[in-house]
């Protein structure tokens, strides 16, 4: 038998390796921006065409490269950052492995123009599929212009897996913000399809945050600053009123590098415990400076995961710094033992009490309540007492209960014919056999084959899911126009997502209009939905949409209606009236797939005599 193991060709090996580093256009944006930062640039321009699928170009005024360096930088593992293994433990630059440009050249068409200050002419290089097509001198300004065209042109299968332009652009804006926030001393510009999206001038970190997130957040920022021998923490956290239903405004940076860490995120959220409403996320931008020998940033190709030498110490420092900032700026209640000087100037303190004042105080009911025996709960006779008594007597005489309108389910938006499914066949409707609620989560009803046990949350989710399905296929939900439209401010990444979802949201009853600069006007809400439909509902919907079903592949409409149904459905703990329970069961019986929720869980169970006997070991 002949040998079967052989070396892969260089172009195939490079394409396989590129898949770990360049997963989508935003991956190239991250690598190119970080290269410009490492080159010492203080003016960086990012130019995008067709959400990075056609063009990703980064132009900087950094130190540039010589002709040999411009050619060598596209070789795999070619780097100027590492000379020995010990250098891996003292890295302070953004890039160091020499994989980014080699990976980009393997899956795109690349053009480079670069010049150093001491050179009269620069260098132009054109690379395609890891092969140098052309290299020649050229006239260009000091710095580097790196253009990546037609991403995945030679790997069509990878290109087919790219998302819509709006979705890819949202990821690009995310990466742009990570670098722009980490280096406020650098001027950044973002241009997409000829339109300038961001023009960020040099300034402080607070100014950079305001430029990216809007002037409204300026008054809601609380500075954080703690310095120790082990690490230093600085940055900003948001006051509780700045919390959102989405996770977008949460950033951690370690030695200038953006990282993701659920462990440190828990440290921040635990410091906010008791200050935030349920399902709200705090705003924070925290920068950790630590000895590079105490961290390992070489644990993932995208370098957004960092391993700390002692995570518990870092967790404790982060939590303590946030708590200290909240207390120091009076965000949390605190006891102040220092007397305000203004109190000393009050007349009640500065003027001594006269004898008349003392006699009036001793004769008062408040003084007697503290000094006389059994007088603490004594109530002085009042002329208004009879009026209050008459009010309650009149109310008791009427004995008419106050109306309690039901907002469980909207009115039926179409004529539905009961199906011949199993649930419709099992329902028994009599005057004596009425459904009842158990544990404020389940509904028990009598069926023709035994007991029917409904999960109110899953059942309602199925009802809403099919209603939203119908809205997407020709029966849009009516819109109730708002007299005073609410204004929704979103971070750039969420704003791009909202732009993408606007047509589908209109079919579902939400009329949303872009107002520019990340702001949207909520002009109308669903007129048939009894759940929360304001701007907070939209923020929550975006959060649910971004994190719903991460392991499943589904189109945008399916993901949206599942997220909306899961958010607006009844939750466990909601007490239901008899009409609400009856309406819920009736609506479910008319569903096309009444037995399962959108996620595949059962909406109800049938307990027949066999199952009941088995429970009692009969």
Image (cartoon, rainbow, N blue to C red):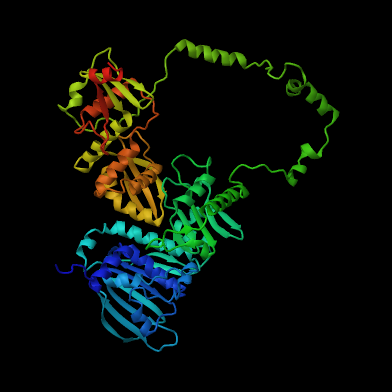
Q: Is residue 191 visible?
A: no
Residue at the spot x=33%, y=73% of the render?
Answer: 76
In the foreground, 173 or 554: 554
Q: Is residue 345 above or below residue 99?
A: above
Residue 251 drawn at (x, y percent): 46, 56
Q: Quadrant of the N terminus?
A: bottom left
Residue at the spot x=39%, y=55% of the render?
Answer: 518
Answer with left or right where residue 432 lies relative to residue 304: left
Answer with left or right where residue 538 lies relative to residue 313: left
Residue 477 drawn at (x, y percent): 26, 39
Q: Quadrant for residue 171, please give it.
A: bottom left
Residue 150 drawn at (x, y percent): 25, 69
Answer with left or right where residue 192 lies relative to residue 226: left
Residue at the spot x=30%, y=77% of the render?
Answer: 111
Q: Is residue 392 visible?
A: yes
Q: Quadrant for residue 515, please give it.
A: bottom left
* Outermost residue toward the bottom in this view: 120
Residue 313 drawn at (x, y percent): 55, 53
Residue at the spot x=30%, y=46% of the render?
Answer: 549
Q: Is residue 398 above or below residue 460?
A: above
In the foreground, 126 or 91: 91
């Amino acid at each position: 038998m002949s040998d079967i193991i052989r070396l892969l060709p260089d172009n195939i090996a490079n394409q396989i390796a590129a898949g770990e580093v360049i997963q989508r256009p935003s991956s190239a944006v991250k690598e190119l921006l970080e290269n410009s930062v490492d080159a010492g640039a203080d003016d960086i321009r990012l130019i995008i065409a067709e959400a990075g699928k056609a063009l990703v170009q980064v132009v900087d005024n950094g130190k540039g490269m010589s002709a040999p360096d411009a050619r060598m930088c596209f070789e795999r593992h070619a780097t100027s950052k590492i000379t020995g293994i010990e250098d891996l433990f003292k890295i302070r630059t953004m890039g160091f492995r020499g994989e980014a440009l080699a990976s980009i050249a393997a899956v795109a068409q690349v053009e480079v123009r670069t010049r150093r200050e001491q050179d009269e002419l620069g260098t132009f290089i054109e690379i395609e599929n890891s092969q140098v097509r052309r290299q020649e001198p050229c006239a260009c300004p000091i710095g580097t212009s790196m253009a990546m065209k037609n991403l995945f042109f030679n790997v069509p299968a990878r290109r087919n897996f790219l998302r819509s332009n709006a979705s890819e652009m949202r990821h690009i804006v995310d990466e742009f913000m990570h670098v722009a926030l980490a280096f406020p001393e650098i001027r950044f510009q973002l241009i997409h399809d000829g339109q300038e999206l961001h023009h960020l001038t040099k300034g402080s970190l607070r100014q950079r945050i305001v430029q990216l997130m809007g002037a409204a957040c300026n008054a809601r920022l609380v500075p954080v600053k703690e310095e120790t021998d082990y690490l230093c923490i600085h940055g900003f956290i948001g006051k509780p009123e700045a919390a959102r239903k989405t996770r977008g405004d949460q950033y951690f940076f370690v030695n200038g590098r953006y990282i993701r860490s659920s462990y440190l995120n828990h440290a921040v959220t635990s410091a906010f415990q008791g200050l935030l409403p349920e399902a709200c996320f705090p705003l924070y931008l925290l920068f950790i400076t630590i000895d590079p020998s105490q961290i390992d940033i070489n644990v993932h190709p995208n370098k957004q995961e960092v391993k700390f030498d002692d995570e518990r110490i870092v967790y404790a420092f982060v939590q303590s710094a946030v708590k200290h900032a909240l207390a120091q700026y009076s965000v949390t209640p605190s006891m102040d033992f220092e007397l305000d000087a203004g109190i000393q100037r009050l007349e009640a303190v500065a003027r001594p009490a006269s004898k008349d004042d003392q006699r009036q105080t001793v004769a008062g009911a408040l003084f007697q309540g503290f000094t006389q025996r059994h007088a603490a709960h004594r109530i002085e006779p009042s002329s208004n007492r009879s009026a209050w008594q008459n009010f309650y007597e009149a109310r008791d005489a009427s004995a008419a209960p106050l109306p309690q309108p039901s907002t469980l389910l909207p009115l039926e938006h179409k004529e539905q014919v009961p199906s011949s499914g199993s649930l419709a066949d099992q329902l028994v409707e009599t005057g004596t056999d009425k459904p009842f609620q158990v544990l404020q989560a389940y509904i028990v009803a009598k069926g023709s084959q035994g007991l029917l046990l409904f999960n109110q949350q899953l059942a309602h989710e199925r009802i809403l899911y099919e209603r939203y399905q119908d809205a997407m296929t020709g029966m849009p939900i009516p819109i109730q126009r708002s007299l005073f439209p609410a204004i929704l401010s979103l971070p750039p990444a969420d704003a791009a997502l909202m732009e993408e979802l606007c047509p589908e949201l209109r079919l579902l009853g939400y009329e949303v209009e872009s107002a520019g600069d990340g702001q949207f006007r909520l002009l109308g809400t669903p007129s048939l939905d009894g759940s929360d439909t304001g701007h907070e509902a939209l923020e929550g919907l975006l959060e649910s949409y971004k994190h719903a079903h991460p392991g499943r592949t589904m189109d945008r409409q399916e993901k949206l209606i599942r997220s909306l149904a899961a958010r607006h459905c009844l939750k466990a703990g909601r007490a239901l009236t008899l009409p609400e329970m009856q309406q819920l069961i009736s609506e479910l019986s008319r569903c096309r797939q009444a037995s399962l929720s959108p996620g595949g869980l059962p909406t109800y169970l049938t307990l027949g005599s066999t199952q009941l006997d088995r429970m009692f070991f009969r």
